[in-house]
Amino acid sequence: MSDSPAQQSGPDLARGLPTDALADGKMLVGHVGADPVLLARSGGEYFAIGAECTHYHGALADGLMVGETVRCPLHHACFSLRTGGAISAPAFDPVACWSVAVRSNKVFVLGKVETAARAPAVVAGEWPQQVVIVGGGAAGFAAAEMLRRQHYKGSLVMLSEDDAAPVDRPNLSKDYLDGSAPEDWVPLRPQEYYAEQGIDLRLKSHVVAIDTQARELELGDGSKVSYDRLLLATGAEPVRLTIPGMDLPHVHTLRSLADTRAIIAGTPTARSVVVMGASFIGLEVAASLRKRGLEVHVVAPDKRPMERVLGPAMGDFVRGLHEAHGVIFHLEDSATAIDAHQVTLVSGATIAADLVVVGVGVRPRLELAEKAGLTLDRGVVVDARLETSVPGIYAAGDIARWPDPHSGDSMRVEHWVVAQRQGQTAALNMLGGQAKFDAVPFFWSQHYDVAINYAGHAQSWDELTIEGDIARRDCAVRYKSKGRLLAIATINRDAENLMAEVTMEGEAA
């Protein structure tokens, strides 16, 4: 940021602010020199941290303060007001932290506090010598990062079948695919990070078996890797249609960086694309490829896009939004065949297709856990600490089915932020912690200039209320069962979404 005063916002906090200018439980943005600073007051104490989230630069002053923490309005990352530390994903990096002094009824923001002086507390207990993580996605990366953040010094191996280091997967169907984000934004960390942190990241590594008695993994090349603690974060794989033409070179699914690269490589010579599936991934792909100027057709058996998750009114809005941008829908229909130039539908219609992207859902990758004899129930069954039925083996992310304290039932969801937070919780517990995973699920979906934020989880509901105006892109849709709030979806009501999240956190079943 420039040192120009014209770009500085709010009061100069180095010169002091009257103590009565900020009420308890409130925040404001000022600056110290060229740095934007969030000043907060909680319980009579004042705290000063960086004003922008380290994930996607959300303005923390527009978020929600809860005790001595602040939550980002964009994607619900949480930071400590006392230390600036990133408490929960999707942010991993801390924000800057300043010391504060109160003198003569004024609060002054002084110098920055060094990172080393505000390191997190280390989990007590006897630590394992060897931790192995199977999976290089959201949960796996978050676990490895948290282990090193907690100053774990033992052996840390990450086995990933991917050919790329962990990436920001939501970006693959959003900004990177539409061409507005360069590829160097996609990796969660640069390649050198793993060597610097002593993380033995092994790409293209396929684990074929777990010997739970010997605590040893067998890899596809015949090598063995032993462990004291093991995290299974094998994720999910895209569902492939069982129709002719699915294996043609212009037909793609989207899960990895390589998948997105392949789709992008096909766009310069393509005119028309068919997207199979009208849920979140499919419609984000549709929006991204419309931004690239392609003619986009969406084929799905649903009556409305996203109706099962968001309800009919929001589904109609999403459809209208995409149609306003030129997307052509073929709903209550499905494909029977794909050939080199077109897709044939059950209705008998044909659609010209230079590219086909299949986004009809994913299935959890459970084969390894099943072969190892772990308890399964539509996922890998874990306890509140994310430990499986075999002591010393944990599971996180898309494969994990955990006891949800909010619904009183078990739950498995395929959300990026959930996977990251589970990876963080599992890491603490592999070091001997007793952390329970009790976060309220959260995800966001981007469609052109409209972001939909969703907190909670509602498989079904008996009451749906709409506050505001969906068509005007200013709304909160609440999903309830027997009067209890299960989930909320919002457009341009970020603070309201955060407040609902806190409400649901306090209403454990």
Image (cartoon, grey):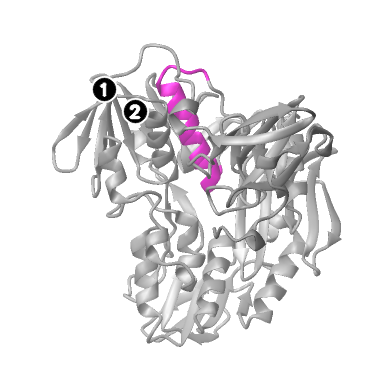
Q: Position of residue 301 (x, y in %)?
A: 60, 68
Residue 230: numbered disc: 2
Label 1 amino acid?
A: Arg
Instruction: Point out the tag, 2 or 1, that comes first from the N-terminus.
Output: 1
Q: Is residue 2 visible?
A: yes
In the image, is 384 to the left or to the right of 319?
left
Label 2 amino acid?
A: Leu
Q: Secondary structure at mark 1?
A: loop
Q: Position of residue 1 (x, y in %)?
A: 54, 58
Residue at 65% across / 69% down in the picture?
Answer: 449
In the image, is 434 to the left or to the right of 199?
right
Residue 215: numbered disc: 1
Residue at 47% across / 18% down in the picture?
Answer: 433
Q: Secondary structure at mark 2?
A: strand
Which region is colored magenta?
413-434
Q: CA distance from mark 2 to mark 1?
A: 9 Å
425 drawn magenta: yes
Which sits in the foreground, 76 or 391? 76
Q: Position of residue 204 (x, y in %)?
A: 24, 50
When asked about the image quadrant of residue 286, the answer is: bottom right
In the image, is 65 to the left or to the right of 167?
right
Residue at 30% across / 24% down in the picture?
Answer: 153
When asked about the image quadrant of residue 207, the answer is: top left
Classify mark 1: residues with Cα within 10 Å, few (<14), some (14-19) or many (20+).
Answer: some
Q: Main secondary structure of the magenta part?
A: helix
Residue contact at pointers 2 and 1, CB within 8 angstroms: yes
Which sits in the foreground, 291 or 224? 291
